[in-house]
Image (cartoon, rainbow, N blue to C red):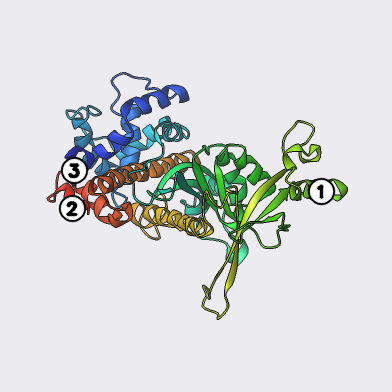
């Protein structure tokens, strides 16, 4: 497998998160070094914060000792300097601030898969998923005030919890955009800013808890295509039955009621929705969208002897553009998001572990570093998979991570082909 040694080391961070991107983020966030001779300038602090995720069992000083030798090879560290103390690293992280690594993430992250990446595409669409996860943070007064606990009273969680909602590229498990908030902030709320990040040529899958008229409308406005499970109880009037057994429905803003709603439905059935004045508001924005409904049964998924009817809503209206079975298969690719979550929580962080940071600003910083390291790993694995013409799922994340860790400390004894 054609993977350069410098890709399989802390170089995996420098390659995917280049120094100039960090320097640009530092400048935009106004957290530049106050002293030109400081031991921990912002770019080094950024790489060390990411390095903490490569060695979650080690303290600050040990991680610094392991990482700085590799950084020296990439011109990001002067090997003549001594490794900083834990207190020095903590203070440097506070100087780096809450938003710098979020800004770095915004600048460097882009879709990883290509037409050469097996499992990344449905026809010409890049398949994405949106979903969320929670993460325990240290139980300090500041963290409790910022993030809150799950539950209350005797059922309150042991630690405060941060909530993260992210867009994921299904074929590569790479996180492409994210929002971080308090546990009490719902997934729907955190998801709303992410819809504007969608692009034409992408197909976003989502579970039924993400649907709302406002969310669907905002996502549609980007030109991306959507494939979402309809929530239970959502009225789906039949507009046209298509040749493949799927049908068109019309999704109408719930604020539109009565006779106006009926006129919109009549226009949709007459294939005249685009000419219906009632289908737009006073600003000319739509209050109704056509959607294609794909229904199918999943037999006894819960093991209770009964099947489950799944109704999918899609902006892909033409059966010739995507068959019903293709859309059903693509919807279930959203479970790849769970694989990405598992890679974060089980392999990078470690099962049952909490984050390190006792201050809310550093929790945010730590989460963005976490996502950056996972992104760098996803790039490495995807490029290796493309070189071998295999699906990235066939490359073990655990083995790739072990190799990165060994090479970072100069102890790797297996070649890049060991990724497979």
| Callouts 1 and 2 close, C-beta under 8 Å | no
Residue at the disc numbered 3: 2
- Left or right: residue 193 compared with residue 338: right
Rounded to the nearest angstrom, the CA distance separating label 2 from label 3 is: 11 Å
Camera-nearest residue between 194 and 179: 194
Residue visible at 20% across and 27% down in the picture: 78
Q: What element carries label 1?
A: helix
Residue at the disc numbered 1: 261
Q: Can residue 87 be seen in this view?
A: no
| Callouts 2 and 3 close, C-beta under 8 Å | no
Residue 125 on image: x %, y %: 46, 45
Query: In which quadrant of the rendered view does residue 407 lie?
Result: top left
Residue at the disc numbered 2: 418
Pair 1/2: label in front? 1
- Left or right: residue 122 compared with residue 315: left
Check the picture and name the quadrant holding the C terminus: bottom left
> Pointer 1: residues within 10 angstroms few (<14), some, or many (20+)?
some
Residue visible at 42% across and 27% down in the picture: 25
Mark sitting earlier along the chain (1/2): 1
Q: Is mark 2 on a helix, strand or loop?
A: helix
> Pointer 2: residues within 10 angstroms few (<14), some, or many (20+)?
few
């Amino acid at each position: 497998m054609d993977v350069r040694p410098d890709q399989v080391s802390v170089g995996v961070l420098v390659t995917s998160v280049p120094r100039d991107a960090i320097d640009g983020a530092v400048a935009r966030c106004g957290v530049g070094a106050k002293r030109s001779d400081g031991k921990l300038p912002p770019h080094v602090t950024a790489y060390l914060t990411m390095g903490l995720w490569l060695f979650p069992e080690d303290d600050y000083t040990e991680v610094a000792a392991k990482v700085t030798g590799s950084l020296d090879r990439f011109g990001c560290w002067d090997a003549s300097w001594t490794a900083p103390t834990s207190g020095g690293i903590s203070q440097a992280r506070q100087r780096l601030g809450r938003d710098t690594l979020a800004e770095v993430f915004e600048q460097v992250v882009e879709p990883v898969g290509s037409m050469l990446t097996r499992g990344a595409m449905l026809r010409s669409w890049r398949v994405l998923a949106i979903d969320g996860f929670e993460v325990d943070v240290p139980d300090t007064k500041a963290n409790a005030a910022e993030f809150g606990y799950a539950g209350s009273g005797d059922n309150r969680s042991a630690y405060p919890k941060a909530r993260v909602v992210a867009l994921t590229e299904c074929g590569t498990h790479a996180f492409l955009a994210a929002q971080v908030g308090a546990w009490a902030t719902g997934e729907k709320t955190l998801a709303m800013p992410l819809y504007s990040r969608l692009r034409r040529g992408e197909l976003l899958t989502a579970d039924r808890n993400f649907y709302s008229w406002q969310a669907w409308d905002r996502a549609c406005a980007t030109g991306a295509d959507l494939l979402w499970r309809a929530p239970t109880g959502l009225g789906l009037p039949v507009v046209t039955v298509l040749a493949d057994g799927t049908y068109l429905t019309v999704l109408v803003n719930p604020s539109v009621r009565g006779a106006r709603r009926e006129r919109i439905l009549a226009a949709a059935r007459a294939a005249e929705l685009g000419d219906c004045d009632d289908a737009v508001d006073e600003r000319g924005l739509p209050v109704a969208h056509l959607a294609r409904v794909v229904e199918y049964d999943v037999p006894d998924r819960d093991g209770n002897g009964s099947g489950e009817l799944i109704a999918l809503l899609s902006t892909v209206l033409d059966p010739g553009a995507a068959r019903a079975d293709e859309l059903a298969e693509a919807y279930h690719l959203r479970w790849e998001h769970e694989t990405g979550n598992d890679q974060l929580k089980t392999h990078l962080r470690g099962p049952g572990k909490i984050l390190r940071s006792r201050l809310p600003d550093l929790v945010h910083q730590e989460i963005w570093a976490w996502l950056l390291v996972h992104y760098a790993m996803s790039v490495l694995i995807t490029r290796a998979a493309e070189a071998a013409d295999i699906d990235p799922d066939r490359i073990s994340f655990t083995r790739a991570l072990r190799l990165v860790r060994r090479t970072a400390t100069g102890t790797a004894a297996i070649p890049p082909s060991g990724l497979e």
